[in-house]
Amino acid sequence: MTLEDLGYRNEYDKFISYNGLTEFEKGRVTVEHKERYIVTSVKGEVEAEITGNMRFTARGREDFPAVGDWVLMSVYDSDFAIIHKILPRFSIIKRQAPGQYGEVQIIGTNIDYAFIVQSADRDFNINRIERYLTICNSSGVRPVILISKTDLADEARRTEIRESIKTRIENVPFIEISNETKEGYEELKKTIKKGMTYCMLGSSGVGKSTLLNNLSGRTLMRTESISMSTGKGRHVTSHRELFILENGGILIDNPGMREVGIADSAEGLESTFDKIYELSDKCKFSDCTHTSETGCAVIEAVENGVIDKASYANYLKMRREKEYFESTVAERRRKDKIFGKIIKDYLKKDVKQKGR
């Protein structure tokens, strides 16, 4: 296996040379388990940890390695390594960490395409698709919508789903697939290129693990059917992991996500709801919130049916989440600054006392 097989880009060589880091071995994080990592290089897989300095200087979760990262490391005894540096990321998909306001959770890094997977039978939710699109657009990752389990939906349901996507979402390809009949697989495989990195985003039970097994040509992940009593998928994938597919594409599998909290996604919202942002230039007031103002071009477009009412409501909800996330981040930084000053003052006082 070469570095290029893992998705390595030659631009990294310039960064490594310029910063004098040529003595370290290059590898890509393929598995993450609570600050323990599996890193794959041309020599194989090693278990790795970060240096104490990286842990001490980290300002947040984004300063730790994640699946998809390229890292520089020192390898010991061929089966253990210490990670010294994370190479610059060209993309990072993240969401608000569930139950932790102001914190982010990294889904994957250095990703070219994201497959947004929803099933045609029970899971389909256009609002959730817009959420996934927002976090993709925020990170510069190109989205592809996959509607799975088409064999479990009749033609009327499938037509309803197609019309819903066409009404709310523009310029995003979507493919209908079945893991049972293999419908749509040929079209899907054409989008997967050697050396490019893809990830799957979706709830549990939509068929992500089965899809991964089928694309890889071997059983990589355990699969289970959805609960017949609740219609909800059971959690099968318990961690994030990077795999090389049969055709050379690279795919990151993720645990099912029930919450898709918006985190720092101003550009993502603008791309997902581009019609709203285009119309905002025509509003009477430059600081229009598009909620109740007189002369709001967005509200007028909603009332006239130019903008879908449900999409507009979803936009407002996600914008409020973004604003709240930003306020909690600012508050946390303010508290950290105060705490840092207390520690600094204490250390100064302690040094003076010892000098007497």
Image (cartoon, rainbow, N blue to C red):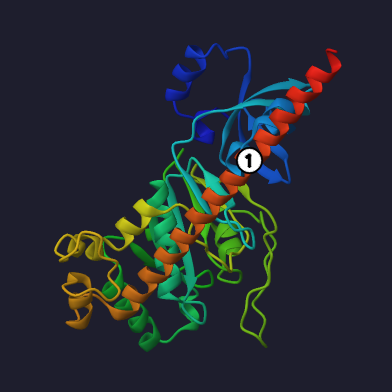
Q: Is residue 67 visible?
A: no
User: Residue 235, position in %: x, y?
Assistant: 68, 67
Does the image show residue 204? yes
Q: Residue at x 67, y 88 (%)?
A: 229
113 is higher (above) or lower (below) than 168: above
Residue 97 lies, with reference to residue 249, above or below; the image says below
Could you tell me which residue is drawn at 35 percent across and 65 percent down?
Answer: 174
At x 30% / y 74%, what residue is drawn? 291
Residue sticking out furthest to the front: 356
**Quadrant position of residue 307:** bottom left
Quadrant of the rendered image containing residue 177: bottom left
**Please, what is the three-letter code of the amino acid marked with disc 1?**
Ile
Crowdedness of circle 1 by 10 Å Cα count: few (<14), some, many (20+)? few
> Residue sitting at 26 percent across and 65 percent down?
170
> What secondary structure is found at the residue carrying circle 1?
helix
Number of marks in the rendered image: 1
Q: Is residue 332 above or below residue 297?
A: above
Percent coordinates x, y for residue 250 in the rendering: 52, 44
Q: Which residue is mark 1?
A: 338
Q: Quadrant of the N terminus?
A: top right
- Residue 246 vs residue 339: left or right? left
Q: Position of residue 163 (x, y in %)?
A: 29, 79
Q: Is residue 26 above or below residue 294?
A: above
Say left or right for 55 vs 2.
right
Residue 14 in the image: x percent, y percent? 44, 17
Quarter of the image where the C terminus is located: top right
Query: 49 or 246: which is nearer to us?
Result: 49
